[in-house]
Image: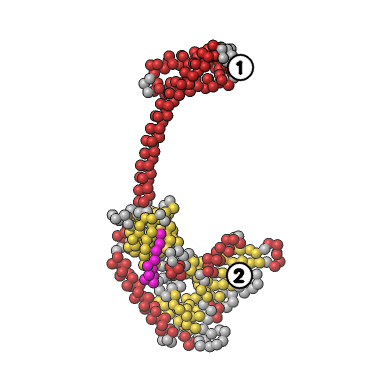
Amino acid sequence: MVQCILHKSWHLNGKSVMKKAVMAMIMGATLLTLSSCGQAKNSDNAQTNVLSSTAESGDSTAEPGSRTGEVQKTQNDSIIGSAGSDLTELDHLTGEYELESSYRFLADSSNIENIEKYEYEGEYNSYDVNEPALEIKKNDDETYQIQIDLFRLWGFYDDAGKITEEGLEFATTGPGGNEMNGVIKLEADIAVVTIFGQEWLDFAGLSEYRFYKTSDVPNIDGFPANQQESSMQNAADTDSEAAADELLDAFIDGLADAVDSEDSASTFSVSDLNLDSEEWDTYSIGEKVDLDNDGENELIINGPYGGIYLDARDDKVYEFAAEEGTACILSYTYYNGAVWIMYSNRSSAGFEFYHMEKFEGADNLTAEMNFGEEFDPDNAEAGIKYTLNGAEISCDEYTELCSKIFAAEVNTN
């Protein structure tokens, strides 16, 4: 019935009648709301009056200014005034509801912030060894106790951290005894640890490390087993390193021979090397560096095509790595937090090939990597081919890889 009336009114009164119909629908929605608030008693009468008024205005053909038109205008004004009063009441109720919702949201946000602060606490494993390597424990004074174990590289124990806008910031003591700073940020269940400063970068070759969370409960007491055991282990490592240094010094002084890497029954002494010569193939005593990531230094003998690297273990000196001419020029580099031995082949034009080895102890090869570039003069249209471990990669990928490796490379010619 209402639909028929509205259809008829559209032809008779145009926009004016449409406005009245819309107001009638608004009043209907208003009455439903008031009914839910306990005011259903008067709703039937009010709805009847509205429909009656709309029907009368739909049947009327009165022109503006006539008495019928004035009556119609008065009825419309009454309807609009009534609807406006009810809508004002609804606006008031809506405002109160929004205020309450805002209060609840702020309370929830505060709770979320507190939860986020506690998310740092827990135990995290290293991707390299799949064992616990990061422990974070919240103290009563809102600071954090942090312990980090970088496998065969360095350990940070009992460092104090504090939440800032940057993340969980901490101060620690570096390998040189100097204070270093770092920050831990969370990416879901991954803790990203960044250690700042050129001193650390020179030592490790890497400043960012990632650990994945395995437990919300840290195991500070068992990481390491306790501080006393850690100190005892450090003392044992120090004694072992001192013994290795003594053996290497004995080789330098001519008191010990080195075992040839190709033939364990063959040895050579420092006097067999061409030292103190001005010839191109002369050798010289270089520095001691931990080249096999075992916490003990190896001895570098600088020389042609990269020289020789010597390791001391089991009360003997061994040839650990050696050059092999232009096809295998020896050097070492820092990559992904470890020292890698590198052999470079640039023996022909349009061809470069590199082989890298990572050790955890001179007799324990743990990883290898091959990469290079090659230009085929018989197929110039193909351009330069770049490879990594046998798979072809893009020029951009190859350039990024080389920039990391060669920036930390140390030549030992």
Which is closer to the viewer, label 2 or label 1?
1
Residues in magenta, as a range? 174-183
Frontmost residue, 174 versus 107: 107
- Image coordinates of residue 22 in percent, x first then y, are 52, 22
Residue at 37% over, 67% down: 179
Q: How far apart are the two marked residues, 2 and 1, measured between alpha carbons?
A: 88 Å
Amino acid identity at mark 2: Glu
The picture quadrant where one finds residue 43 is top left
- In depth, the one of 257 and 141 nearer the eye is 141
Element marked by disc 1: helix
Label 2: state its secondary structure. Answer: strand
In the image, what residue occupies the spot 58% across and 63% down?
398
Figure quadrant of residue 96: top left
- In percent of width and height, residue 340 lies at 49, 69
Which amino acid type is marked by label 1? His
Q: Is residue 280 above or below residue 10?
A: below
* Left or right: 90 in relation to 368: left
Question: Does the segment drawn in magenta span residue 179?
Answer: yes
Visible residue check, residue 366: no
Please give the residue where the numbered disc 1 appears in the rendered image. Answer: 11
At 28% across and 67% down in the image, what residue appears? 228
Question: What colouring style does the render use?
Answer: secondary structure
Q: Position of residue 211 (x, y in %)?
A: 42, 57
Q: Which residue is mark 2?
A: 352
